[in-house]
Structures are given as structure tokens and as C-alpha cells.
Image (cartoon, rainbow, N blue to C red):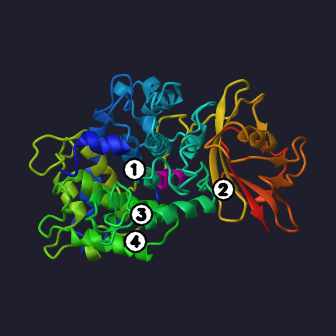
Amino acid sequence: MSRPLSVRRGVLTAAAALGAFALTTLPAAATSSPAQIATSKTNGVAYLKSLQAADGSYAGSGLSNEWAFSALAAAGTAAVDVTPGGDTTKNARSVYRDLLSTGGWPSTSPVVTDYERATLNAYAAGIDPARVSASRDLIADIYGYWQSAEPGYFGPSANFNGTVFAALALNGAKTQSGQVRVPQALRDALVTRIRANQHNDGGWNYSKAEGDPTQPAATSDIDMTGAAMAALCVSGVPATDTGITHAKAFLKSKLVANTGAFNAMFGANTDSNGWAVAGLNACGINPQTGDFLTSLGKTPVDFLIAQQFNPGGGFKYLPADTSPSAYSSIDGLRAVAGGGFTAAPPVPVTPGAPQWVAQSALSAGTATKLALTVDDGTGSLKVCSVALTPTGPTTTLGAVLDAAAGAATPSGCVTSVAPSSGTGTVTSVNGKANSGSNTWKVSVDGSAFAAATRGKTVGVGDTIALRWGA
């Protein structure tokens, strides 16, 4: 067992299109055929549909099945098409969006992985994570956990998986047009921290290794190695990078020849195999050929399909189990379907249902948050969630920067702005003034950087990047 279910899901409670690798056209050496994979997907989706509650929900208080959205999307099923007894008013997407929009979600003591998990699953469900509602911007929620004293980490650095899943969420949950919404400087900071935590054997663990003289020599975890690989690849690191090739070698060393399973910390199991395959998928590494076809002709996908009950479609956790596990069924299906840790939402088949739903405008008088990064060109990146209460359907960059000076989490993101009023060009931020061709520029949702003006319109859910340079 890779770890008790309550611990696995509590640590993350925690995979993208993420560059997901399609398994529909496989070389002759692959042992699970496209037809077998298609059957596994069909039956797996049917099982996940059976997990939907009568009120249409997958997620709720405590441990729940919201990761089903990432698996359904990877398998080609839109969340809005999943309904209890055909009742479209209770479709899974609408119910999930309503949950994420409530003021009491996720809890009175949230952690960063709550928002990362929601971002990955909202995206897969066809809910723009930055525009869940007038008051809910999941990207801004994640930004609020930036560690100013340890730049690049999100949430306490000792809980390293919070940083890995920040990379997965911020890079994998793209805009509706498919654009990475966060700036390169933030992507680079995340990659640097993930690299710094790689173990000597090529893998990763949930806990922090950077700065610990003993941890890099510890044996790595199969699950976290898959997630960290995916985090690097979705952040733009190529599969030929030494960090990825070392991780690939670690996974290969854990293959069991007669089953294709990875020998995880607690033995061969569906969840660990699912996460490892998701990491390979995200990096475009075929889990059915080459290094992952064993000497006895087995692959990790073979192992996963062997854990599936058919025609019921559920996956068991351990090979000896006699009944399916909901969580294992989610991990198993997502991996077999070729997914990473999230996937772009499929086009719905429900008449009139859009591929995406999103809040279209700010709501005057309703408090909200916006995601902001400030890069002064010295390598001292600042990341924060800015709280403000708009007075209309849009706001301005000047209003956001003014609000950041007094209502940003973490604090210190913006300490001063010049000019302090009007709609003209931003000439100085945090004491750093424009100088020749080096000026303050702004990007929204990954757009090209352009001259920053106080009057620039900012809309609901916009992810704002401010940068000083030529």
C-alpha cells in the first residue's frame, strides 16, 4: 500500500492535458492494445459516474471524489454531461462550481493544496479556475501561499508537495484559450525549487529535501516522483532534461518484470502506478514501450488494466483486493486514459452546454481577490493575492496596485506606486523607476508585456504580471 488513503488524500487531499500522451496509437511492442484501453476507459467512466451522489455532487466535506473530474476529462467525458438519473439541473459541473463559490469552502483552516486540487479539477470540469464566481479566484487563492522568505515554495516548504502541486495547477490549468496564465519568472522559481528537492536516486518524496544533509540520500517515493516529473514538464522542462531522465531511470529501476507494476514503498498498487504513469504521460514518455516494457513483456498500463473489474469498471487498490476503491479507480482511469493530473475539458454532448463556464465580470461591492506578481528585474520576484472590493464590473491596474499596498497576502508585494493617482503611465513601483528603455510593463493572463498604465482595465479573474525591463 503506497500509504493509507486518509494520509494520501490529506497530504494533498491532493495531472493536464499537461502534455498528456495519447495512448490510442501504440507500437506493436505495447501489450495493452488500443481496443483494450478503449474498453478500460468506457468501463472506468461508467464506474465513476456511479460515484455521483443523488444531489449531483462528487465533492463535499472531508475526503471526497472530486479528483474524478480530472479522470473523466482525460477519458473524454465532460463533467456537465454527468448527471444523476439524467437530471441536468444537478449536473456535476454546476454542483461543483456552486460548492467552490461558497464562502465556507474549503474550511475554516484551509491549506494550499485545497486550492491546488480545486484548480486542477475545476479546469478539467470546464470551470475557469480564476473565474469561479465574482468572489472566487482559485489562482489568487494559491498565490496567497507564496513563501516570501523561501521564494518558489507555496505553503510551508517542509510540505514539499504543496509546491509541486502549485506548479501543476498554475501551469496546467491554462486560460480558456489555452494560454499559460502565469509569467515565466514564476515558472522558473517553481522549477528551481523542484530541482533542488530531487533525491540522489532520481526521484522525490512528499517532504522537503533541500537543505537537509540526509534527505537526498533517502529512497524516493513512486507517487511523488510521478507528480514532480509532471510538474517539471508542465512548467516547460523538456523530457530530455537530466532531471527528467534521472526520474525516468528511477521509475524503471522499480519495475516488476512479471506484472509491469512499480514496486512502491508499500508494494505494488493502483494509486502509485497511476501517479507514476501520469508523470510519464505528462512528459510525453510512452509507458508501454522502451524502458517501460519489461523483459517479460509487461508494462505499467498492463498492470493498471489488470486491476480493473469488468464490466463494472472500478479499479482495486491492491492486487489481492476483491472490491474496487473509488480513489484507485480515479487514479487508474486517468493514467490509462493518457492523462497527467488534469486535462482540458471535453466539448459537452448536452445540447446547449458550453465547454467552459466562468464569471464574466466583477460584482460591485462584492469583495474579491486578484493574482499579482511583481518582477523588478533583480531576481527578487514578489507574488501575492490582492484583496479589493470593486465599484463596477471592471477595475484598473492602478486600483489593484493601490490595494496591494495595504491588502495583499503575503504582504510587501507592493510598497509604493508612482504616480499615486490618475490613469497615466506607471513610472515607479517599490522605488524602482523607469529608466530609458527599462520600464514597467504589464501582462494579463499570459499576454505579451506592454506599457503599464494606471488606467489599464482589469477584469474578473485576471492574472496580473508586472515586470521592469526593456
Three-letter code, disc 4? Ile
Position of the C terminus, as image quadrant, is bottom right
Residue 348 visible at all: no
Q: Is residue 289 above or below residue 163?
A: below
Main SS category, magenta section: helix
Between residue 412 and residue 175, name the one nearer to us: 412
Tell me where the magenta segment starts and ends, as one range.
166-170
Q: Label 3 is placed on what type of residue?
A: Glu
Disc number for residue 446: 2
Corner quadrant of residue 57: top left
Task: Give the CA distance from mark 2 to mark 3.
Answer: 30 Å
Q: Which mark is residue 159?
A: 1
Task: Identify the mark nearer the N-term, 2 or 1.
Answer: 1
State the separation of the CA atoms marked 1 and 4.
22 Å
The amino acid type found where label 2 is placed reads Gly
Marks 2 and 1 sit apart, C-alpha to C-alpha, by 28 Å
Please identify the quarter of the rendering in which residue 223 is found: bottom left
Residue 312: x, y in percent? 19, 41
Which residue is labeled 3 in the image?
210
- Badge 3 marks a residue whose secondary structure is loop
Of label 3 and label 1, which has the lower sequence position? 1
Where is residue 15 drawn, in percent x and y?
41, 53
Between 202 and 290, the one nearer to me in the picture: 202
